[in-house]
Amino acid sequence: MSTITTLPAQPSTPVAYRPPGFVADTWNVMVRELKPVFREPASVLFAMVQPLVFLGLFAPLLPEVENGSALQWFVPGIIAMTALMGASFTGANLTQEIVTGSHERLLVSPLNRSSLLVGRALKEVVPMLMQAGIIVAVVTPFSFDLHLGGIIVCMAMLSLFSIGVGSLSFALALVSKDQEWLFWTVQQTLVFPLLLLAGVLLPLEGAPGWLETASDLNPLKYVVEAARHLFAGSFPADTIAAGFAGAAVVAVLGLVVGLRAMRRSS
Amino acid sequence: MTHTQPVIRTAGLTKTFTRHKQTVEAVRGLDLAVHDGELVAFLGPNGAGKSTTLRMLTTLIQPTSGTAEVAGYDVVSGRRDVRRSIGYVGQGNAAGHAQRGRDEVVSQARAHGMGRAAANARADELLEAFDLAEHARRPVSTLSGGQRRRLDVAIGLVHSPRLLFLDEPSTGLDPQNRVNLQEQVQRLNRELGTTIVLTTHYLEEADAIADRVLVIDHGRLIADDSAARLKSALGDRISLGFASRDAAVAAAGRARRIANANVMLNDTDVTVRVPHGRDLAPAIVTALAESGTPAIRIEVVGPTLDDVFLDLTGRSLRESNETAETTVTQGAAA
């Protein structure tokens, strides 16, 4: 074990202090959050285990449909599921930071409180895109038609959705503080009903009235519907607008709730 | 060292929490001033209010009432300026466990407004100084406790703050790492003139490194002085052994004539607690021998800060900690 030999009094190079700003702070938070993703890209697979299992074990059971393969119908839902899973898990990282202390250090740093939330939420787009890329790469060799234009528009919609879900997940982490079980209980309780009520695994056509009403209230349903059209290369304006509206509702709700939680964080 | 400019000033600083519908007064009307260049320790048992005070001074929580100025800024209205001016080493780890050490030093430098090149240069400089250069590209979760603690301090010093707060810095460290950390803290204070405020429930730590010890109990400041003066005010303990009960009784009678002495008689032993006891002891022994009741055994013990705490509160700090540490260990295991 060693003792320090030299104490760096002042930085040896002159330091240019920028005036603080929301954009710079948000950027710094996002870059920090992305470091572990880029250092360990395989980490994005963790949130993908369940969607990949569904893809592998569920897709072969799907009945053939008249126009196009069942995969064409199923994959957009699985990609939306991955986005939901990944972004909803993300608060667990914040829970860990709250437990180990690095969240506290960031709270004492000059970083803007809002940036601490927004920077994290924006980062969610990156693993989501990586995960979607992996799934598309996996299914393309099978009977799956690639419509790049539609996929790009769909990724924009899912980015908005991921930012919202990520913010909600962070808000849940902030409220749960160091009670990790609370975070996971709430997350698990919410995620599966949301998935089933969005028609990700099974079509909702012919559902009883109450189920239909519940699913109409689920923003993910509109996102998944729009994603299916976009992946098929069709652009019906009203469905796609509804998808973006659903994603935007989640994004706005997430940011409002997340910012409130972060400003109160101590 | 010049102690002129107060860098911390509080007036009636108070924090109350409501837990399970019960109001807990964690800090009750604290008035204190810390001057530039001081090394101050907040000493008290767990739950005494030291960390709550530190959390108010570092803007983590807002005071319920009263005011505090840190580095010239109000901790509520000027909290962003306070955050820019202070370094903070919390009870946990500053570096995220999923991150790599160097990335975290750089990110902290960036958070303080340094450009990319300056942040990288500063990170390398600090990692070198804290002997972390070879570990800095590993995930923080794989570092040892001592390495993580050095990383915490490095992160706290990124912007060369004039004022550094450390919350229970040596808790959980093995004795060697603890001494190492204490040396680093002292050198920061002596060589760079960094004002340092730390909390500790280790008596030895407060005694060994702080210029000034603020004893806090039940949210109140109950003593504020150098460790040496706090202890000398209490006096040394002189234990004398005698050949017979009669000799002890006679000696106790003589000892009671010493000014400010507190004398206790126990069988053939006499215990005298008196200021500057170690200076008086030779004369006492000589006088006892001349009067025909010579001491056959003598022990002079200086007071510890635990004696000071016991004298102030009627409780032993060591015992308070033992109870508290059991709780902490259980909490960590859960």
Image (cartoon, coloured by chain):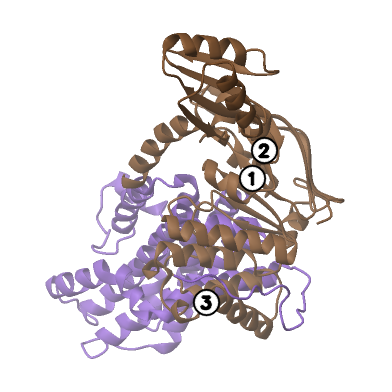
Chain colours: A purple, B brown
Q: Nearer the viewer, residue B274 or B91?
A: B274
The relative height of residue B227 versus residue B174 in the rendered view (above or below) is above
Q: State the SS at label 1.
A: strand
- Please say if the residues under marks 2 and 3 sit with CB atoms less than 8 Å apart: no
> Which quadrant of the view contains residue B138?
bottom left
Q: Tell me if I can see residue B263 in this picture.
A: yes
Q: Is residue B308 left or right of residue B316?
A: right
- Subunit that carries the residue with mark 1: B
Q: Residue furthest right?
A: B4
Q: Are marks 2 and 1 on the same chain?
A: yes
Q: Nearer the viewer, residue B75 or B288?
A: B288
State how far apart marks 2 and 1 are (Cα): 6 Å
Residue with the mark numbered 3? B102
Q: Nearer the viewer, residue B295 or B84?
A: B295
Q: Indicate the amino acid at tag 1.
A: Ala
Residue with the mark numbered 1? B41
Q: State the SS at label 2.
A: strand
Q: Indicate the amino acid at tag 2.
A: Leu
Q: Position of residue B268 (x, y in %)?
A: 43, 15
Q: Indicate the amino acid at tag 3.
A: Arg
Q: Nearer the viewer, residue B33 or B299?
A: B299
Mark nearer the N terminus (1 vs 3): 1
Mark nearer the N terminus (2 vs 1): 1
Residue with the mark numbered 2? B214
